[in-house]
Amino acid sequence: MTPLKLKHPIERRSTATGEVVDRVTELTFVKPNLGAMMDAFGSATGADGQADVGVLLTVLAANAAGISVSECRSLDLEDGMKVLTAVQGFLPSGLVAGLSGSTSSLGISASPQTGEAGAPPNSGSSAPAPAPGTGG
């Protein structure tokens, strides 16, 4: 696999001085074997003790890239999404997380969704939304 160049390199610092002692500017991924996958599944639990896909992907990404889980979690969002997309290629099709190939738009919608009572979802309001143009 072609190395992934990080837009924001990982800086490894000395615990004694805090100085940067190493900069990881690119990651090369190694496809995990069954044992590594099973280890990742075993450690993929959230704070509530339940299986957590985010933790699974983070553990797999860190192991495949040869970095620590904490380094993987501290990646810049743009770099992190590239890493997760690369790792997704190692997963069986039934476990693909939908990080790429989405047909939905990330842009702002001209017609926002409304909840049951006409209020925006998760707005905390059960009152109907005011009619357009009423200033309410």
Image (cartoon, helix red, strand yellow):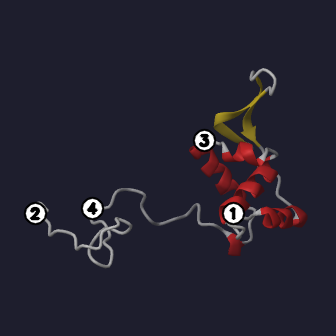
Q: Secondary structure at mark 2?
A: loop
Q: Are marks 1 and 3 in contact (CB under 8 Å)?
A: no
Residue 71 is situated, as x and y percent measured from the top left of the image, at 73, 42
Q: Secondary structure at mark 3?
A: loop
Q: Secondary structure at mark 1?
A: loop
Mark 1 highlights which residue?
A: 46
Which sits earlier in the primary sequence, circle 1 or circle 3?
A: 1
Q: Residue at x 32, y 79 (%)?
A: 116
Residue flagged by tag 2: what amino acid is it?
A: Gly
Residue flagged by tag 1: what amino acid is it?
A: Gly
Quick check: 135 above or below 27? Answer: below
Q: Are marks 2 and 3 in contact (CB under 8 Å)?
A: no
Mark 4 highlights which residue?
A: 110
Residue flagged by tag 4: what amino acid is it?
A: Ala
Which sits earlier in the primary sequence, circle 2 or circle 1?
A: 1
Mark 3 highlights which residue?
A: 76
